[in-house]
Image (cartoon, rainbow, N blue to C red):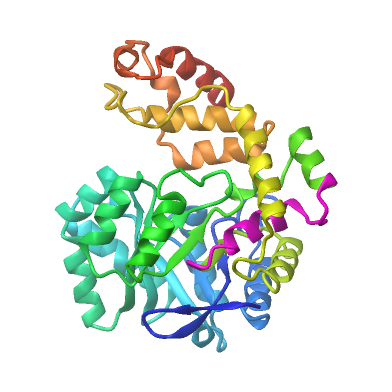
Amino acid sequence: MLYRKFNKTGQDVSLLGMGTMRLPLAEDGSIDEATAIEMIHHSIDQGINYVDTAYMYHKGKSEELVGKALKDGYREKVLLADKMPVWLAKDEEKMKEIFETQFERLDVDCIDMYLVHSVDGPIWRRAQKFNLMDFLYEKQAEGKIKHIGFSFHGDLDLFKEVIDMYDWDFCQIQLNYMDKEFQAGVEGLKYAASKGIPVIIMEPLKGGKLTDKLPASVKELWDNAPVKRTPAEWGLRWVANHPEVMCILSGMSNPEQLAENLRIMDQAQPNSLTEEELAIIDKASAEYNKLIQYSCTECRYCMPCPKKIDIPDNISYYNEWFLYDGNPKVKADFFTFTIEGRRASACVACKACEEKCPQHLPIAEIMAKTADLFEK
């Protein structure tokens, strides 16, 4: 296992982190507890020392599972990360209740790495309204949390604004070779690093979409590459090639994925990909982009929607369905990360959004197609 430094403490952090959003499942859809705990134990035994969970993962059961897995001496071997989903709190008191519930589920005295979860414009405003940062600093002073950061899903300008607002210990962004200019992107990665803020990476393989059901043109690129690597290795090596990255979270769903990722992260040195290899990855990205149905830039001029639909988000899922060749994980993500009653099917085709769209997209038509694809 390769390691990189955590600036705040000088501690060596494993390049591969154990994400717990996509743990192995039993036939009834619940977590396969025995396999999941065995995987977490094996990951730590093999050198992983960063374990990440969140309040809503696996409908609240991920935190409980992680708490069980970190018994018998494993807790002391890792940095434990958890997050505050401030959008689920109706007021400050509920936010504080969520925090206490996390400690009950995890059954720990301290969380090492605590994040404001999924920051975008509305969530950041809510966090400020509820004085979340004051609350976290208070809990840090009490010794309940050690390091404060945030995970991010907004645009680049907001990312820089949030980075500059506090003396963060670390941050977490989505990054893969398809998302170089999406959300914080590579520019955000380098901006955080320029401020001395370590960066944790999530979705390095877009939840498995860069490894499952490959488009024929992408498969041909990998098959004909001079260096033979699996799709997962190409994706993870691209992220690890950036020296600004401290740790890469992977939500591994079975022991085979864990074994492959451990192998990859034993070799993924920064700046180790050749120009030829980087060019091949760029070609793969371009092939995926050819499959995009609607060129929404997520400028959000179409918002707000009278029915509270997140229009760019729904368009993104529709595009991803074709981008990743009907991968069922896209549909699963749609229902996991969109809010019932605010999905595409709530569209009444008022077309107020279409008047504002600089790309002149037929948004009402796209919403109807999205609803037919995912909700019927």
Q: Does the magenta stretch include residue 234?
A: yes
Q: Which residue is located at x 43 percent, y 85 percent?
A: 10
Q: Say which quarter of the image contains residue 113.
A: bottom left
**Res 90 seen here:** no
Is 25 above or below relative to 111? above
| x and y percentages locating residue 36 in the rendered image | 64, 67
In front here: 299 or 320? 299
Q: Say which quarter of the image contains residue 172.
A: bottom left
| x and y percentages locating residue 201 in the rendered image | 50, 60
In front here: 132 or 153? 153
**Res 108 seen here:** yes
| x and y percentages locating residue 157 in the rendered image | 29, 46
- Number of marks in the image? 0
Span of residues in magenta: 224-245
Q: Is residue 100 magenta?
A: no
Q: Which residue is located at x 51 percent, y 21 percent?
A: 371
Is 29 above or below relative to 99? above
State which quarter of the image contains the N terminus. bottom right
In front here: 270 or 350? 270
In front here: 147 or 299? 299
Q: Which residue is located at x 66 percent, y 58 percent?
A: 253
Residue lying at the far front in this picture: please name it. Answer: 275
Q: In this view, does 194 lie to the left or right of 257?
A: left
Is 265 above or below relative to 254? below
State which quarter of the image contains the C terminus. top right
| x and y percentages locating residue 255 in the rendered image | 73, 65
